[in-house]
Image (spheres, rainbow, N blue to C red):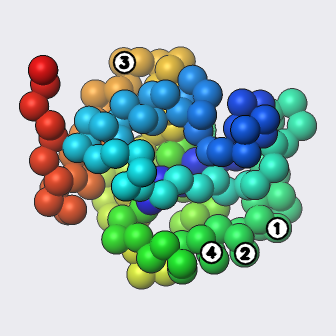
Amino acid sequence: MFVGEGPGADEDASGLPFVGKAGQLLNNMIAAMGLKREEVYIANIVKCRPPGNRTPEFIEATTCSQFLVRQIDIVHPEVIVALGATAATYLLGVKQSLASLRGQWHSVRGAKVAVTYHPAFLLRDPRQKAEAWKDLQRVMAEMHLVAPKRP
Ligand code: URA
C-alpha cells in the first residue's frame, strides 16, 4: 500500500489517486519493484484537494484519518510506503524530519511502514531518485520482490 498526501487537480477530476505527473512517476516506481499498479493499493492522507493545492492542515488530516484507518484495516497491507513528509507525519503520528524517518521500519495497525520521498518532490529534484530507490529496495527485500530485468 502506498499513501500520498492528497488529491491534486487531476485526481480531483478523475476521482482516482495519483493519475497526474506524480502518478506517472509512482507507476514507474511500482513497476521497478516488479509490481503492477493493480497489485497495490494507493490512498491519500486527505480525501479532498486542499484549496490551491496547499499542504493539508492538521484539522483536515485528522478529520480524514478515520477513512485512511478503515482503508488500512480492510486492505490489511503487509507493507505501507509513506510518500513524503505529510504522509509520514499523519500516518505515524510523529513530527520528525523525513531524513530521520527514512531507512527504518515503523509500524501502523499491523503493517510495516517505510518512508520515502513523494514522487512530486522527486520530479522537482530527480537527484534524490537514487535515495528513493534505496528505500524501495528495502521494501522489496522485506517482501521478497525481485526487480524485473531491464529490456
Ligand atoms: N499527490 C498525492 O499526494 N496524492 C495524489 O493522489 C496525487 C498527487
Disc nearer the start of the sequence (3/1):
1
Distance (Cα) linking label 3 and label 2: 35 Å
Task: Identify the amino acid type marked 1.
Answer: Thr
Q: Please tell me how crowded label 4 is: few (under 14), some (14-19), or many (20+) other residues with Cα within 10 Å.
A: some
Distance (Cα) linking label 4 and label 3: 33 Å
Task: Identify the amino acid type marked 2.
Answer: Gln
Distance (Cα) linking label 1 and label 2: 7 Å
Task: Identify the amino acid type marked 4.
Answer: Val
- CB atoms of marks 1 and 4 within 8 Å: no
User: Residue 127 got which mark?
Assistant: 3
Q: Where does label 2 land, which residue?
A: 66
User: Residue 69 got which mark?
Assistant: 4
Q: Secondary structure at mark 1?
A: helix
Distance (Cα) linking label 1 and label 4: 11 Å
Q: Please tell me how crowded label 1 is: few (under 14), some (14-19), or many (20+) other residues with Cα within 10 Å.
A: few
The quarter of the picture where residue 65 lies is: bottom right
Q: Secondary structure at mark 4?
A: helix
Q: Is residue 116 left or right of residue 54?
A: left
